[in-house]
Protein backbone atom coordinates (compact mmCIF):
# COMPACT_ATOMS: atom_id res chain seq x y z
CA UNK A 1 0.00 0.00 0.00
CA UNK A 2 1.22 3.56 -0.58
CA UNK A 3 2.73 5.29 2.41
CA UNK A 4 0.90 8.50 3.38
CA UNK A 5 3.13 11.30 4.61
CA UNK A 6 2.36 13.09 7.89
CA UNK A 7 0.77 16.56 7.97
CA UNK A 8 3.16 19.44 7.36
CA UNK A 9 2.70 22.84 8.97
CA UNK A 10 3.66 25.63 6.58
CA UNK A 11 6.17 28.00 8.22
CA UNK A 12 4.74 31.46 8.83
CA UNK A 13 5.44 34.22 6.37
CA UNK A 14 6.85 37.33 7.93
CA UNK A 15 4.16 39.97 8.52
CA UNK A 16 6.64 42.79 7.97
CA UNK A 17 8.05 45.34 10.36
CA UNK A 18 5.64 46.18 13.15
CA UNK A 19 5.21 49.49 15.01
CA UNK A 20 5.71 49.55 18.79
CA UNK A 21 2.83 47.86 20.69
CA UNK A 22 0.42 49.97 22.74
CA UNK A 23 -2.80 49.34 24.66
CA UNK A 24 -5.72 49.47 22.20
CA UNK A 25 -9.40 49.48 23.29
CA UNK A 26 -11.16 46.11 22.71
CA UNK A 27 -7.81 44.57 21.77
CA UNK A 28 -5.28 45.12 24.55
CA UNK A 29 -1.51 45.26 24.15
CA UNK A 30 -0.82 45.12 20.39
CA UNK A 31 0.71 46.89 17.43
CA UNK A 32 -1.52 47.79 14.49
CA UNK A 33 -0.64 48.48 10.87
CA UNK A 34 -2.85 49.55 7.97
CA UNK A 35 -1.87 48.10 4.57
CA UNK A 36 -3.31 49.97 1.59
CA UNK A 37 -4.32 48.27 -1.70
CA UNK A 38 -0.87 48.97 -3.16
CA UNK A 39 0.80 47.07 -0.31
CA UNK A 40 2.23 50.13 1.48
CA UNK A 41 2.35 49.64 5.25
CA UNK A 42 1.17 52.52 7.47
CA UNK A 43 2.10 52.00 11.17
CA UNK A 44 -0.77 53.08 13.41
CA UNK A 45 0.54 52.60 16.96
CA UNK A 46 3.89 54.39 16.77
CA UNK A 47 3.17 57.53 18.76
CA UNK A 48 6.60 58.93 17.89
CA UNK A 49 5.63 59.05 14.21
CA UNK A 50 3.80 61.71 12.21
CA UNK A 51 0.51 59.79 12.30
CA UNK A 52 -1.00 57.30 14.73
CA UNK A 53 -4.35 56.03 16.00
CA UNK A 54 -5.93 57.72 18.99
CA UNK A 55 -6.97 55.25 21.68
CA UNK A 56 -10.06 57.23 22.66
CA UNK A 57 -12.93 56.51 20.29
CA UNK A 58 -11.68 53.25 18.72
CA UNK A 59 -14.49 50.69 18.32
CA UNK A 60 -15.46 47.69 16.23
CA UNK A 61 -12.46 45.48 17.03
CA UNK A 62 -14.36 43.05 19.26
CA UNK A 63 -16.77 40.22 18.41
CA UNK A 64 -18.55 40.25 15.07
CA UNK A 65 -22.09 41.71 14.87
CA UNK A 66 -25.04 39.39 14.22
CA UNK A 67 -28.68 39.57 13.18
CA UNK A 68 -30.97 37.04 14.90
CA UNK A 69 -34.14 35.76 13.26
CA UNK A 70 -36.68 34.17 15.60
CA UNK A 71 -40.19 32.76 15.60
CA UNK A 72 -42.76 33.36 18.39
CA UNK A 73 -43.22 30.37 20.69
CA UNK A 74 -46.82 29.48 21.68
CA UNK A 75 -45.86 29.14 25.34
CA UNK A 76 -44.17 32.53 25.37
CA UNK A 77 -40.89 33.96 24.22
CA UNK A 78 -39.37 32.94 20.91
CA UNK A 79 -37.17 30.30 19.30
CA UNK A 80 -34.04 31.22 17.40
CA UNK A 81 -34.34 30.25 13.74
CA UNK A 82 -31.30 31.79 12.03
CA UNK A 83 -28.11 33.65 12.92
CA UNK A 84 -26.67 35.93 10.23
CA UNK A 85 -23.20 37.51 10.60
CA UNK A 86 -23.30 41.16 9.54
CA UNK A 87 -20.63 43.37 7.98
CA UNK A 88 -18.35 44.89 10.59
CA UNK A 89 -17.84 48.65 11.03
CA UNK A 90 -14.60 49.87 12.61
CA UNK A 91 -14.27 53.43 13.93
CA UNK A 92 -10.64 54.52 13.77
CA UNK A 93 -9.58 57.98 15.06
CA UNK A 94 -6.26 59.05 13.49
CA UNK A 95 -3.95 61.90 14.52
CA UNK A 96 -1.73 63.47 11.84
CA UNK A 97 1.03 66.03 12.29
CA UNK A 98 4.06 67.49 10.54
CA UNK A 99 7.15 69.59 11.28
CA UNK A 100 5.57 72.42 9.29
CA UNK A 101 2.43 73.06 7.27
CA UNK A 102 3.82 71.57 4.06
CA UNK A 103 4.89 68.33 5.73
CA UNK A 104 1.57 68.06 7.58
CA UNK A 105 -0.42 68.65 4.36
CA UNK A 106 1.56 65.97 2.53
CA UNK A 107 0.97 63.47 5.34
CA UNK A 108 -2.74 64.33 5.49
CA UNK A 109 -3.22 63.92 1.75
CA UNK A 110 -1.20 60.70 1.54
CA UNK A 111 -3.16 59.04 4.35
CA UNK A 112 -6.46 60.17 2.85
CA UNK A 113 -5.48 58.56 -0.46
CA UNK A 114 -4.30 55.37 1.30
CA UNK A 115 -7.78 54.89 2.80
CA UNK A 116 -10.02 56.13 -0.02
CA UNK A 117 -8.24 54.18 -2.77
CA UNK A 118 -9.91 51.06 -1.32
CA UNK A 119 -13.11 52.22 -3.05
CA UNK A 120 -11.39 52.03 -6.45
CA UNK A 121 -8.66 49.43 -6.16
CA UNK A 122 -10.01 46.88 -3.68
CA UNK A 123 -9.81 46.48 0.10
CA UNK A 124 -6.99 47.46 2.39
CA UNK A 125 -5.97 45.38 5.41
CA UNK A 126 -5.94 46.23 9.10
CA UNK A 127 -3.31 44.08 10.80
CA UNK A 128 -3.09 43.44 14.54
CA UNK A 129 0.16 41.91 15.85
CA UNK A 130 0.62 40.60 19.40
CA UNK A 131 3.85 40.44 21.40
CA UNK A 132 3.77 36.62 21.07
CA UNK A 133 4.18 36.95 17.30
CA UNK A 134 0.60 36.08 16.32
CA UNK A 135 -0.98 38.28 13.64
CA UNK A 136 -4.64 38.68 12.67
CA UNK A 137 -5.96 40.65 9.71
CA UNK A 138 -9.23 41.99 8.39
CA UNK A 139 -10.05 43.51 4.99
CA UNK A 140 -11.43 47.05 5.14
CA UNK A 141 -13.00 49.64 2.85
CA UNK A 142 -13.10 53.36 3.58
CA UNK A 143 -16.65 54.52 4.32
CA UNK A 144 -16.41 58.04 5.68
CA UNK A 145 -14.78 60.40 8.16
CA UNK A 146 -11.60 61.82 6.65
CA UNK A 147 -12.45 65.34 7.81
CA UNK A 148 -10.49 67.61 10.11
CA UNK A 149 -11.78 68.77 13.47
CA UNK A 150 -12.51 72.23 12.14
CA UNK A 151 -11.27 73.91 15.32
CA UNK A 152 -8.92 76.81 15.89
CA UNK A 153 -5.22 75.86 15.38
CA UNK A 154 -6.04 72.66 13.50
CA UNK A 155 -5.05 72.25 9.89
CA UNK A 156 -1.74 74.13 10.30
CA UNK A 157 0.68 71.43 11.42
CA UNK A 158 -1.71 68.92 13.02
CA UNK A 159 -5.28 67.63 12.83
CA UNK A 160 -7.28 64.46 13.48
CA UNK A 161 -9.93 62.47 11.64
CA UNK A 162 -12.39 59.82 12.78
CA UNK A 163 -12.39 57.26 9.99
CA UNK A 164 -15.13 54.66 9.53
CA UNK A 165 -13.98 51.42 7.89
CA UNK A 166 -16.45 48.90 6.46
CA UNK A 167 -15.65 45.15 6.43
CA UNK A 168 -17.67 42.84 4.15
CA UNK A 169 -16.35 39.82 6.10
CA UNK A 170 -16.71 40.54 9.85
CA UNK A 171 -14.16 37.93 10.92
CA UNK A 172 -10.44 38.38 11.58
CA UNK A 173 -8.17 36.03 9.63
CA UNK A 174 -4.88 34.52 10.77
CA UNK A 175 -1.89 35.77 8.79
CA UNK A 176 -0.39 32.26 8.72
CA UNK A 177 -2.11 29.52 6.71
CA UNK A 178 -2.57 25.97 7.97
CA UNK A 179 -1.60 23.32 5.42
CA UNK A 180 -1.92 19.54 5.35
CA UNK A 181 0.02 17.55 2.75
CA UNK A 182 -0.45 13.93 1.66
CA UNK A 183 1.34 12.04 -1.10
CA UNK A 184 2.10 8.51 -2.25
CA UNK A 185 5.12 6.61 -1.03
CA UNK A 186 7.38 4.37 -3.07
CA UNK A 187 5.81 1.41 -4.87
CA UNK A 188 6.94 -2.12 -3.97
CA UNK A 189 7.92 -5.06 -6.15
CA UNK A 190 5.41 -7.91 -5.97
CA UNK A 191 8.04 -10.54 -5.11
CA UNK A 192 10.70 -8.49 -3.26
CA UNK A 193 11.28 -9.18 -0.44
CA UNK A 194 8.02 -11.18 -0.25
CA UNK A 195 4.70 -11.16 -2.13
CA UNK A 196 3.04 -7.74 -1.73
CA UNK A 197 0.98 -5.30 -3.74
CA UNK A 198 0.76 -1.54 -4.23
CA UNK A 199 -2.67 0.05 -4.41
CA UNK A 200 -3.82 2.12 -7.40
CA UNK A 201 -5.36 4.61 -4.98
CA UNK A 202 -4.15 7.07 -2.38
CA UNK A 203 -6.30 6.79 0.74
CA UNK A 204 -5.80 9.59 3.25
CA UNK A 205 -7.68 9.58 6.52
CA UNK A 206 -6.70 12.34 8.90
CA UNK A 207 -8.02 14.75 11.50
CA UNK A 208 -7.79 18.42 10.58
CA UNK A 209 -7.80 20.97 13.40
CA UNK A 210 -9.34 24.41 12.88
CA UNK A 211 -8.08 26.50 15.81
CA UNK A 212 -10.29 29.44 14.86
CA UNK A 213 -13.69 30.50 16.17
CA UNK A 214 -15.81 29.96 13.03
CA UNK A 215 -15.99 27.77 9.93
CA UNK A 216 -13.29 28.03 7.28
CA UNK A 217 -13.57 27.13 3.60
CA UNK A 218 -10.40 25.33 2.49
CA UNK A 219 -8.53 25.31 -0.81
CA UNK A 220 -7.46 21.93 -2.24
CA UNK A 221 -4.57 21.42 -4.64
CA UNK A 222 -4.31 18.05 -6.40
CA UNK A 223 -1.13 16.92 -8.11
CA UNK A 224 -1.23 14.04 -10.63
CA UNK A 225 -1.11 11.33 -11.63
CA UNK A 226 -4.77 10.70 -10.76
CA UNK A 227 -7.91 9.80 -12.67
CA UNK A 228 -10.46 10.93 -10.05
CA UNK A 229 -10.34 12.42 -6.55
CA UNK A 230 -12.98 12.24 -3.81
CA UNK A 231 -12.93 14.41 -0.66
CA UNK A 232 -15.16 13.42 2.28
CA UNK A 233 -15.93 15.13 5.59
CA UNK A 234 -16.28 12.26 8.04
CA UNK A 235 -18.64 13.76 10.62
CA UNK A 236 -21.33 14.79 8.12
CA UNK A 237 -20.65 12.48 5.17
CA UNK A 238 -20.55 15.44 2.77
CA UNK A 239 -18.27 14.87 -0.21
CA UNK A 240 -17.35 15.96 -3.69
CA UNK A 241 -15.49 14.25 -6.53
CA UNK A 242 -13.24 15.76 -9.17
CA UNK A 243 -13.13 13.79 -12.44
CA UNK A 244 -10.86 15.36 -15.11
CA UNK A 245 -12.47 13.20 -17.79
CA UNK A 246 -15.72 15.16 -17.32
CA UNK A 247 -14.10 18.17 -19.01
CA UNK A 248 -12.46 16.10 -21.75
CA UNK A 249 -8.97 16.12 -20.27
CA UNK A 250 -8.53 12.55 -19.17
CA UNK A 251 -6.51 11.52 -16.15
CA UNK A 252 -4.10 14.00 -14.64
CA UNK A 253 -0.56 13.31 -15.79
CA UNK A 254 2.37 13.30 -13.38
CA UNK A 255 3.03 16.83 -12.15
CA UNK A 256 -0.23 18.34 -13.45
CA UNK A 257 -2.20 20.29 -10.83
CA UNK A 258 -5.81 21.34 -10.23
CA UNK A 259 -6.94 23.79 -7.52
CA UNK A 260 -10.41 23.56 -5.94
CA UNK A 261 -11.63 26.58 -3.94
CA UNK A 262 -14.69 25.94 -1.79
CA UNK A 263 -15.76 29.59 -1.23
CA UNK A 264 -16.52 30.86 -3.75
CA UNK A 265 -16.76 27.57 -5.66
CA UNK A 266 -14.00 27.53 -8.26
CA UNK A 267 -11.95 24.84 -10.00
CA UNK A 268 -8.89 25.80 -12.02
CA UNK A 269 -6.44 23.69 -14.00
CA UNK A 270 -2.78 24.76 -13.81
CA UNK A 271 -3.12 26.89 -16.98
CA UNK A 272 -6.10 28.79 -15.52
CA UNK A 273 -8.76 26.85 -17.45
CA UNK A 274 -12.17 26.66 -15.76
CA UNK A 275 -12.80 23.07 -14.63
CA UNK A 276 -15.94 23.66 -12.56
CA UNK A 277 -17.68 21.06 -14.76
CA UNK A 278 -15.26 18.40 -13.49
CA UNK A 279 -17.12 18.24 -10.15
CA UNK A 280 -19.90 15.68 -9.65
CA UNK A 281 -22.81 18.13 -9.74
CA UNK A 282 -25.47 18.18 -8.35
CA UNK A 283 -24.30 15.80 -5.62
CA UNK A 284 -21.07 17.72 -4.94
CA UNK A 285 -20.98 19.47 -1.55
CA UNK A 286 -18.00 21.80 -1.15
CA UNK A 287 -17.89 21.49 2.62
CA UNK A 288 -16.35 23.72 5.26
CA UNK A 289 -14.23 22.94 8.34
CA UNK A 290 -15.93 23.91 11.65
CA UNK A 291 -13.94 24.97 14.73
CA UNK A 292 -12.17 22.07 16.43
CA UNK A 293 -11.24 18.69 14.99
CA UNK A 294 -12.82 17.26 11.83
CA UNK A 295 -12.20 13.79 10.33
CA UNK A 296 -11.30 14.12 6.65
CA UNK A 297 -10.74 11.44 4.00
CA UNK A 298 -9.53 11.87 0.44
CA UNK A 299 -9.12 9.20 -2.18
CA UNK A 300 -7.25 9.32 -5.50
CA UNK A 301 -7.94 6.73 -8.16
CA UNK A 302 -5.12 6.01 -10.59
CA UNK A 303 -2.47 7.38 -8.26
CA UNK A 304 1.25 6.88 -8.77
CA UNK A 305 4.60 8.29 -7.64
CA UNK A 306 4.22 12.04 -7.06
CA UNK A 307 0.45 11.98 -6.56
CA UNK A 308 -0.39 14.43 -3.79
CA UNK A 309 -3.18 16.38 -2.11
CA UNK A 310 -2.70 19.68 -0.24
CA UNK A 311 -5.37 21.28 1.95
CA UNK A 312 -4.87 24.94 2.93
CA UNK A 313 -6.95 27.36 5.01
CA UNK A 314 -6.62 30.46 7.18
CA UNK A 315 -8.23 30.24 10.66
CA UNK A 316 -10.90 32.92 11.27
CA UNK A 317 -11.64 34.62 14.58
CA UNK A 318 -14.36 36.68 16.25
CA UNK A 319 -11.96 39.26 17.69
CA UNK A 320 -8.63 40.86 16.94
Image: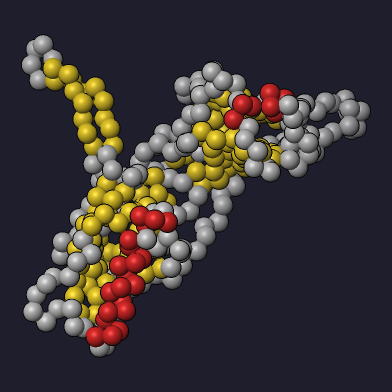
Q: Quadrant of residue 190?
A: top right
**What residue appears at the point 80 percent right and 28 percent down from the top-left corner?**
198
**What residue appears at the point 23 percent right and 64 percent down from the top-left corner?**
146
Q: Position of residue 84 (x, y in %)?
A: 28, 32
Is residue 143 toward the left or the right of residue 155 in the image? right
Q: Position of residue 315 (x, y in %)?
A: 43, 45
Task: Look at the image and tell me whether residue 1 can be seen.
Answer: no
Q: Position of residue 142 (x, y in %)?
A: 30, 56
Is residue 101 toward the left or the right of residue 233 in the image? left
Q: Quadrant of residue 244?
A: top right
Of all residues, the one furthest to the bottom in this rendering is 100
Q: Quadrant of residue 28?
A: bottom left
| Closer to us: 78 or 247 | 247
Q: Position of residue 126 (x, y in %)?
A: 35, 59
Name the quadrant of the N terminus. top right
Of all residues, the one furthest to the front in this rendering is 120
Figure check: 110 above or below 165 = below
| Closer to us: 276 or 222 | 276
Colouring mode (rainbow / by chain / secondary structure / one colour) = secondary structure
Figure check: 187 above or below 124 = above
Amino acid sequence: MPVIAAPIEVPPEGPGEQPPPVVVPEVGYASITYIDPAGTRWPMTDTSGEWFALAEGVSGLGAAPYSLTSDPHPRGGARLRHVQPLPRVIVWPVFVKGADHNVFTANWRNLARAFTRTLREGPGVLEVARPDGSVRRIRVYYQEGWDGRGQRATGINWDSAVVTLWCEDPYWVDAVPVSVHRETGARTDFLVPYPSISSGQVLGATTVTNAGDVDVWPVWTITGPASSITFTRGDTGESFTLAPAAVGHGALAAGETVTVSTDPPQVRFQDGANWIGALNWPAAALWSLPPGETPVTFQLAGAGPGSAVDLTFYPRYETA
